[in-house]
Amino acid sequence: MKKTFINMICFVLIVGMTCFTASTASAQITFPNNPYQISVSDGQNNGHTMCYNPTRNEYLVAYMSFPTTSRRVIQYFRLDSTGTKIGGPVDVIDDLEGSSGPSVCYNSARQEYLISYQGYTSAGGLHSELRIQRVNAINGALIGGSTWIRNSPTVIATKVSYSPTSD
């Protein structure tokens, strides 16, 4: 059976998978025996990234959201082991004019997720910024505010990972 999925990400639970990144898909796609679909209905979203939390057997999904009524922001939500959303999407709060390119990882020692992303602002001359946001892995709440790491005159591609041997 063919289904139309707009601005979505699909995933299959795979033993040993800890994280992956996917982009937007807009096509007639067949997914036999795959019950998992994650999508939004307002505006656009892309640049999805996901990580697995083996302690709670759940996932954090982060992506760039471009609602029809506001600027591009990073949003995230959690999924339980059956692919059911735990709560609604949460915005990463920052003072940028737009954000994109998230990357996520899970820190088992601190029971938290880390989202790294790039954004842009014209304040002080147009430039990109590398930012991070910590998220509580138990309740999904933001931990503090978005933290600036560095500026760049060009786009910054973010990738983040966690080393359990050096916390």
Image (spheres, helix red, strand yellow):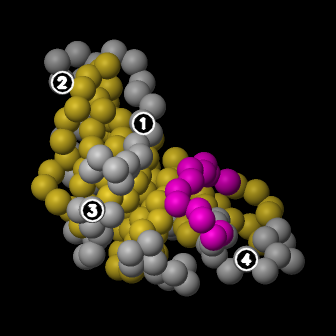
Residue 94 placement (x, y as % from top left): 20, 45
Magenta highlight range: 14-25
Q: Which mark is residue 44?
A: none
Q: Amino acid at mark 4?
A: Asn
Q: Residue at x 23, y 32 (%)?
A: 149
Q: Amino acid at mark 2?
A: Ala
The 10 Å Cα crowd at callout 1, few under 14, some 14 to 19, many 20 or more, is some
Q: Could you say whether the residue bearing mark 4 is in a helix, strand or loop?
A: loop
User: Which numbered disc, 4 or 3, marks the residue that appears first in the sequence?
Assistant: 4
**Residue 82 location, quadrant:** bottom right
User: Which numbered disc, 1 or 3, marks the residue that appears first in the sequence?
Assistant: 3
- Give the residue at mark 1: 158
Q: Disc 2 vs disc 4: Cβ atoms closer than 8 Å? A: no
Q: Please give left or right for residue 94 compared with residue 165 in the image.
A: left
User: Which numbered disc, 4 or 1, marks the residue that appears first in the sequence?
Assistant: 4
The 10 Å Cα crowd at callout 3, few under 14, some 14 to 19, many 20 or more, is few
Q: Amino acid at mark 3?
A: Ala
Residue 8 placement (x, y as % from top left): 60, 61
Q: Residue at x 45, y 53 (%)?
A: 63
Select label 4 or label 3 by which is in front: 3
- Give the residue at mark 2: 123
Q: Could you say whether the residue bearing mark 1 is in a helix, strand or loop?
A: loop
Residue 114 placement (x, y as % from top left): 31, 53
Compute the Cα span from label 3 to label 2. Answer: 37 Å
Q: Residue at x 55, y 67 (%)?
A: 39
Q: The N terminus is located in which quarter?
A: bottom right
Closest to the observer, 93 or 21: 21
Compute the Cα span from label 4 to label 3. Answer: 33 Å
Q: Which mark is residue 34?
A: 4
